[in-house]
Amino acid sequence: MTMQPYELGDTELTGDQREAFERMIDMIAARYPGRGHGQHPDEEMMGEAMSGALMVLVGDATLEGLAQEWSRARVAEREAMGRLTGAVIATADAGVAETVIAERTGLNRRSVRLALGK
């Protein structure tokens, strides 16, 4: 994958950093090959991976700092899922059908049933 200057925004890289980032882009592209290789395209994750690589490369972030960010996000996700589970239970208790709850939440029906302990 050839890196275009606009992909870096305002970030200026030395020649060595540019070469390193190009290697990283190739590795990231191999990690997220996309639909052409029978996998779901995940362009957003590919962009986030490139962003993380660039942030560490230029010293704007560290591996440890990004790991802590991910850990906090996982905790926030579990908390939000707990609140959603409670909302599913309350909504079902009010007589709303599982299929309607699934439609309103974007969950599949199996996930709704799991939240309801079924």
Image: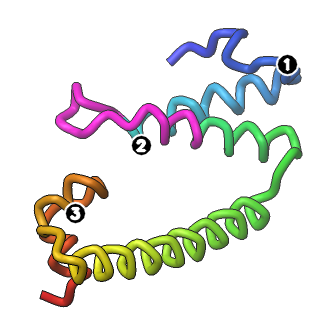
Q: CA distance from mark 3 to mark 1?
A: 45 Å
Q: Which residues are magenta?
A: 33-48
Q: Which residue is mark 3?
A: 101
Q: Looking at the image, is mark 2 or mark 3 nearer the viewer?
A: 3
Q: Secondary structure at mark 3?
A: helix
Looking at the image, residue 115 sits to the left or right of residue 100; the answer is right
Q: Which residue is mark 2?
A: 31
Q: Are marks 3 and 1 in contact (CB under 8 Å)?
A: no
- Residue 44 vs 94, above or below: the answer is above
Residue type highlighted by circle 2: Arg
Q: Is residue 62 magenta?
A: no
Work out which quarter of the rendered image holds the C terminus and state it.
Answer: bottom left
Residue type highlighted by circle 3: Ile
Residue type highlighted by circle 1: Asp
Q: On the image, which quarter does residue 6 sit in?
A: top right
Q: CA distance from mark 2 to mark 3?
A: 35 Å
Looking at the image, residue 42 sits to the left or right of residue 97; the answer is right
Q: Position of residue 109 (x, y in %)?
A: 13, 65
Looking at the image, residue 69 sits to the left or right of residue 34; the answer is right
Q: Which residue is mark 1?
A: 10
